[in-house]
Image (cartoon, grey):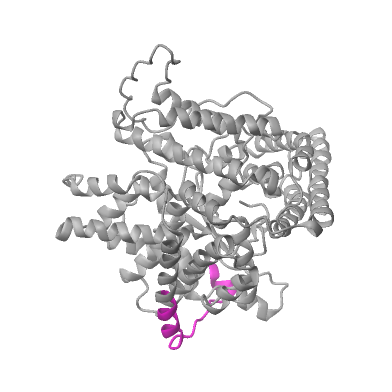
Amino acid sequence: MAAPAPTPARRPRSRRLAALAAALAPLAACSGGASAPPPSAGAAPPAAAPPAAAAPARPEEAPREPFAALRDRILREWAADEPAFARSRGLHEQDGKVGDYSAAAIERRLARLERDRAALAAIDAAALSPDEALDRALLLQQIDLKLFHGRDLEEWRRRPQFYGELFGVNHYLDRAYAPLPERARRLLEHEKAALAQVPRVLENLASPLPKPVLEVAVKIFRGYAEYLRGDVVKLLKGVGDAAFQADFEATNAALADAAERLAEHLAKVELPKGDASHVLGEARYRRLLLAQEGLSMPLAEFKRMGEEDLAANKAAYQELARKVKPTRPKAEQLLAEATRMMEASRRFVVDREIVSLPSDERAIVKETPPYMRWNSAFLDAPGPFERKGLEAFYYITKPDPSWPKREQEEYVMPRGTLLSTTVHEVYPGHFVQGLWVNRAPTEAQRMFESYSFVEGWAHYAEQMMIEQGFGKEDPQSRLGQLADALLRNCRVVVSLGVHAEGMGLDEAERRFVDDCAQDRATAREQALRATFDPGYFAYTLGKLQILKLREEAKAALGPAFSLRRFHDALLAHGSPPLPLIRERVLAELKAPAPPPAK
């Protein structure tokens, strides 16, 4: 997102934090309009085959909704209920609208999700086609995750960040999916609808609130106020006639003031009485693993998984760090260096047959616009349903020339980290995976994504490319990959420690410094992130799941194993939690390979 980040960030960060986005997404019905039409609106690839006829209902039961109709209704209502989520996926029927954040509307949404879950569970997956069965499993998982956030965590009552949609107008400005005057009109409609919902925030929040979450929330809402008063005004200066400008200036100022007042209330009234209720506890942490990842495993096994990968990467990093001194490109060379790395990684993917590229679309390296400069390097790609403004940008942020010279030099990533980031964000990471998602066979598989699959694939790509020999001429490449792996390793042990083992934030910070080679500022930021994003273990979890599945495929196929065919099979079904597609991927790999295209 282009709106303010939760905390100041110097490290590269993906803009596709799927689980975090899910955590902040509203559970409310849409405010200000009728339901949206189905997501694809006639523009998506062909849907899966029709389901088998539904079993006849017993006389005392209401007739069951056929699966295809049930699935399509859930997708349609999901997009209508969550306008910000719909915009992020490239669906614009709800532009200009925000969720209804009244307690009654949120409760209705949760109750409907529970009914929809029961209806999906009553359908026999064996009677469905493979893609329909996956759609059913994916919808069940997404509903379980939404209910976990709404019922178990009660985020609408416990986390002010839940209401970020009201102030987050960046989707209207980040991508040219329509002419700017049209997007500006929708932005103004959004701001007016948001002002009507702002009073719901304090009505719904139940004091006392988690102290670390409040600390982050204060920064977020102050950031929104600054963003609205600064970047939004600059970007829309001169758009429309005088009447529009007057209306926009007054409405935008009122929304910025509302964000500022909310931040001040949280800082002065709520923060002094903030508590430690951000801690999930063992039982809820296990439910998080099940809802977010479809995993049911002892926490001791989960911890061992994270600690073992950390220990291996730490030993390799320390050995290499004694021999290799990282270097950094000059600020004026940063874009050229990132472009060179991106093109080199693409050539390597093609020449070594790492994964098929579904299209000739290319990412474009650009300097980060001023209003998006909170992040050092990230991919900004269109949602899978977007039909205009389809360019994907790999943004690189140069240091501010007004900073002291030493600070400017330290801001630029070391070459090894820049290479790892480029692989993660573009080839064969998020950008390539996004190309596959755009061509997934069903709307559900294009609409929903799993935190661990999206970030796990990109993190796996960093390690896999090094294993395949990319960047082998410079040992900094391996050092950068290991440094990023250690950061993600510590997220596993800190998330579990904070939420299920009594770890305090000071101890969490020490682990990032002592075990994962992070500076103090990054360590504190990452420790704090655990309090509001406990699922950020997903990077390492997803990577390890893919590596395990790859070994299973190698064992099953023997000499017939092909890395490209494995990756193609893995990416062909959208971005679901890996347990939902493990057996299908293995079965497809065991089937005879299709003949090469002529």
Q: Is residue 455 above or below residue 175?
A: below
Q: How many discs appear?
A: 0
Q: Is residue 143 left or right of residue 27?
A: left
In the image shown, does 242 or 327 lie closer to the viewer? 327
Q: Quadrant of residue 439?
A: top left
Q: Is residue 276 magenta?
A: no
Residue 87 in picture, x, y percent from top left: 58, 39
Q: Is residue 592 above or below residue 385?
A: below
Q: Is residue 456 left or right of residue 154?
A: left
Q: Quadrant of residue 139?
A: top left
Q: Is residue 325 magenta?
A: yes
Q: Main secondary structure of the magenta part?
A: helix
Q: Is residue 197 left or right of residue 59?
A: right
Q: Is residue 321 above or below residue 470?
A: below
Residue 307 in picture, x, y percent from top left: 44, 70
Residue 266 in picture, x, y percent from top left: 79, 53
User: Which region shows up in magenta?
Assistant: 313-335
Query: Looking at the image, which residue is at 62% across and 56% down?
Result: 532
Q: Is residue 492 left or right of residue 309?
A: right
- The answer to whether residue 113 is seen in the rendering is yes
Query: Looking at the image, which residue is at 68% across and 49% down?
Result: 159
Residue 518 in picture, x, y percent from top left: 56, 75
Quadrant assignment for the C terminus:
top left
Query: Looking at the image, which residue is at 23% across and 45% down?
Result: 588
- The answer to whether residue 360 is seen in the rendering is no
Q: Quadrant of residue 83?
A: top right
In the image shown, does 363 or 571 lie closer to the viewer? 571
Query: Looking at the image, which residue is at 46% across and 48% down?
Result: 290
